[in-house]
């Protein structure tokens, strides 16, 4: 039974966004008995019926296409100047299009400053929580999401596709031993959802729901409690506060552009690492002149999209990479911190596929045309792909700021997303591309084609957590240092990027945050 | 609101026309040039009906036959696939024939782009672009205009118009939508035999 709540009901917990963070938090709070929750989601609601095995059609349906501006030296500034990020604007957020890779952080990755030491130009801090703190929540998240290959789910890894087998063979030839396929995709029926049929098109939304997404797990379960109201196509414009500085409502625009003020007891922001800091900056007031919860000046800073690049290998015989899950394997042998390689931190090689339409769009040989490019695409069925996922150093100048003049359809400044590689990031990418080349050379591949960085799927760090209020925006619970009834519930609270795809950690943090919020509500602290 | 969104998204475009959200999405992604304003929408069936291997029956009505023919040749030279028949390049270009009816700036860009390309071809080789026999010679001419809005527009639109044509996919071994066939779990997702 779907609940509805009055705009003037000041007991409502408002959650902004319905993705990995917001969708999970809503369900966790509702299951624990929090009885008035409103999810405001900017995007439309789709169902499995709406999902197509069509790259461009689903890109158009799911993506966040409101105007954004890129800056910095990263390649989207040249190749996609108004699309810094490839993330979703839909109920379920980017869990609709994510690949399902579910890796935990390594213990040392919660202590980057301690582990790597001071790194010139990097704004490193340690997380205010440890791997040991996170273990129980990682287990809960792996069980909730159905991570195949994780003991918590009891499911074995997915069966190996051609693309998996090619990656494993290449990795083995150069002495790598740690190739895994840990995915929130059912390898057999689990939690009321079917096993994977190796359809491909994970990134276009899983047609059968074998991949975990809040769209068809957390959100319907949250609504079924009768404690949660989901309002799709509700774009939050501003968070408001009372004289004491506590937040007390959010202003949002519905699909017709009509503005509403929803009163709130607690506000949890989970709009991903571009919109979440943008919302705080757009909520500046006479009391908070630099933006809400921004006494540290760190709102919008330390943006991380991983140290990354991509490449395709062309093999001598067919691979047919499009057959099977979009991510086929994760080569983890370089995830360690090993300064003897000439850089701090590490990286994973995410072995993946793209369909012909996206391979053509992403493939930018130097000129992006001519036989140099078409001789690659002619071998489409001989290709395998990799996306490098390295730890990116946080830098203060990488981040989200408000455009001085350009406004969106609601009259708010559009975000500028600046990103440039730290010197360490560039070394990681160079090493990773070299290792990918060795893996494929060893298999007799006759050509490796490097692909420029594409719009960021992982967007992190722009409201980071910190032990000290001067270093970051939120504490170890995701609670704003400056405003105790304001929470950040998405990847923008990350203090570092690690080498893991972020979703599992976002979900684990949301489960943990829900426990804290319920505890604080019981104690009348919230 | 949709119109406002289009406006916000298109404010950098020199030539605006009525564009769908879908096209704008592609444009944001494919950004070939700051002047790109419209994508290629629907692939007409007419080009796909051509009987002969390399011949194509595409008629250009709003673009002149000469401009259409030049753009088809240019399309092949930008993305030359020996295994792809001309009819698919023609099909990609044919969408312009419909678009220019509502978009005078696009027509002007294409007409003047082709005119300049032909002028340079004649200056250099004594023949119009499409009549220069050697691909290498024609590609030299394309390098000269590679940075132009005209070239980048055609290149960017071809990414969609050529590679998103489902009729073209089998030539590349790409199999498209699979869920309705039960995916590949029982249909060769692990059929590799050379490792």
Image: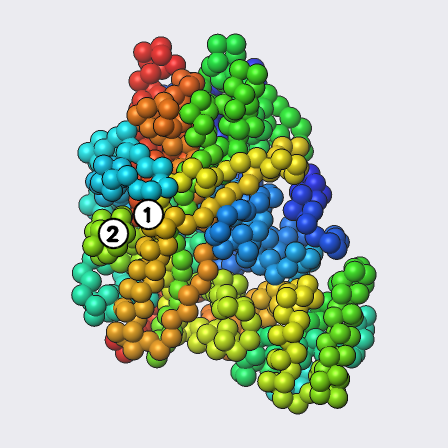
> In the image, is A246 to the left or to the right of A235?
left
> In the image, is A34 to the left or to the right of B98?
left
> In the image, is A199 to the left or to the right of A181?
right
Q: Residue at x 30, y 42 (%)?
A: A119
Question: In the picture, residue B122 is in which quadrant?
Answer: bottom right
What x and y, as percent, mark residue B82? Answer: 54, 83
Assess disc 1: are there few (<14), some (14-19) or many (≥20) residues with their C-alpha within 10 Å of its C-alpha: many
Assess disc 2: are there few (<14), some (14-19) or many (≥20) residues with their C-alpha within 10 Å of its C-alpha: many
Q: Residue at x 60, y 82 (%)?
A: B85
Residue A476 visible somewhere in the drawing:
yes
Q: Nearer the viewer, residue A314 or A183?
A: A314
Tell me, for residue A391, which label it has, or none.
1
Query: Is disc 2 in contact with disc 1, using a CB cutoff of under 8 Å?
Result: no
How did the renderer colour the structure?
Answer: rainbow
B134 above or below A132?
A: below
Question: In the picture, residue A158 is in which quadrant?
Answer: bottom left
Quarter of the figure with the C terminus of chain A: top left
Helix, strand or loop at label 1? It is loop
B101 above or below B74?
A: above
Question: In the picture, residue A398 is in which quadrant?
Answer: top left
A183 above or below B92?
A: above
């Amino acid at each position: 039974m779907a609940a509805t709540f009055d705009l003037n009901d000041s007991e409502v917990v408002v959650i902004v966004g319905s993705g990995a963070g917001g969708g999970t938090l809503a369900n966790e709070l509702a299951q624990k008995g929090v009885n008035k929750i409103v999810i405001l989601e900017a995007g439309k609601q789709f169902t499995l019926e709406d999902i197509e095995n069509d790259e461009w059609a689903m890109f158009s349906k799911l993506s966040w296409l409101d105007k954004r501006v890129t800056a910095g030296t990263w390649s989207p500034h040249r190749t996609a100047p108004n699309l810094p990020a490839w993330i979703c604007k839909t109920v379920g957020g980017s869990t609709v299009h994510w690949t399902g890779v579910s890796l935990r952080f390594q213990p040392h990755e919660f202590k980057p400053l301690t582990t790597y030491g001071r790194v010139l130009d990097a704004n490193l801090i340690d997380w205010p929580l440890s791997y040991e703190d996170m273990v129980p929540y990682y287990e809960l998240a792996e069980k909730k999401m159905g991570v195949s290959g994780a003991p918590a789910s009891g499911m074995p890894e997915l069966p190996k596709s051609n693309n998996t087998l090619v990656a494993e063979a290449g990795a083995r030839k150069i002495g790598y031993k740690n190739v895994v396929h840990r995915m929130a995709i059912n390898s057999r029926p689990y939690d009321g959802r079917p096993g994977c049929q190796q359809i491909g098109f994970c990134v276009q939304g899983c047609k059968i729901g074998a991949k975990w997404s809040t769209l068809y797990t957390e959100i319907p379960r949250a609504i079924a409690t009768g404690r949660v109201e989901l309002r799709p196509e509700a774009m939050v414009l501003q968070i408001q506060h009372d004289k004491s500085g506590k937040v007390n409502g959010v202003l949002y625009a519905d699909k017709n552009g009509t503005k509403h003020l929803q009163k709130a007891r607690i506000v949890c922001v989970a709009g991903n690492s571009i919109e979440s800091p943008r919302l705080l900056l757009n909520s500046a007031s006479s009391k908070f002149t630099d933006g809400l919860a921004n006494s540290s000046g760190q709102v919008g800073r330390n943006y991380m999209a991983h140290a990354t690049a991509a490449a395709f290998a062309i093999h001598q015989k067919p691979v047919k990479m499009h057959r099977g899950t979009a991510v086929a394997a994760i080569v983890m042998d370089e995830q360690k911190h090993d300064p003897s390689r000439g850089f701090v931190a590490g990286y994973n090689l995410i072995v993946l596929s793209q369909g012909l339409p996206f391979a053509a769009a992403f493939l930018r040989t130097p000129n992006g045309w001519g036989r140099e490019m078409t001789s690659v695409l002619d071998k489409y069925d001989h290709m395998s792909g990799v996306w490098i996922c390295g730890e990116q150093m946080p830098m203060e100048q990488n981040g989200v700021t408000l455009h001085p003049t350009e406004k969106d359809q609601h009259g708010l400044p559009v975000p500028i997303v600046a990103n440039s590689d730290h010197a360490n990031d560039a070394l990681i990418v160079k090493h990773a591309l070299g290792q990918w080349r060795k893996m494929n050379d060893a298999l007799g591949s006759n050509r490796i084609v490097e692909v420029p960085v594409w719009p960021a799927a992982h967007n992190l760090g722009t409201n980071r957590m910190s032990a000290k209020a001067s270093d970051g925006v939120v504490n170890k619970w995701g609670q704003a240092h400056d405003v105790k009834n304001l929470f950040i519930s998405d990847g923008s609270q990350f203090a570092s990027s690690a080498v893991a795809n972020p979703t599992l950690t976002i979900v684990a943090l949301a489960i943990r945050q829900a426990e804290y919020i319920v505890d604080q509500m019981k104690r009348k602290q919230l | 609101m949709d119109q406002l969104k289009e406006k916000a998204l298109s404010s950098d475009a020199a030539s605006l026309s009525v564009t769908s959200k879908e096209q704008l999405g592609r444009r944001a992604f494919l950004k070939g040039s700051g002047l790109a304003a419209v994508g290629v929408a629907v692939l007409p069936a007419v080009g796909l009906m051509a009987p002969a291997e390399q011949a194509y029956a595409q008629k250009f009505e709003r673009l002149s036959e000469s401009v259409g023919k030049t753009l088809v040749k240019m399309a092949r030279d930008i993305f030359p696939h020996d295994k792809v028949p001309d009819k698919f390049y023609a099909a990609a270009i044919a969408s312009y024939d419909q678009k220019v009816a509502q978009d005078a700036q696009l027509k002007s860009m294409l007409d003047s782009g082709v005119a300049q390309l032909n002028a340079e071809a004649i200056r250099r080789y004594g023949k119009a672009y499409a009549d220069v026999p050697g691909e290498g010679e024609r590609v030299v001419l394309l390098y000269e205009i590679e940075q132009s809005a005209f070239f980048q527009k055609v290149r960017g639109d071809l990414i969609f118009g050529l590679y998103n044509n489902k009729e073209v996919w089998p030539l590349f071994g790409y199999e498209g939508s699979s869920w309705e066939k039960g995916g590949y779990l029982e249909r060769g997702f692990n059929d590799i035999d050379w490792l």
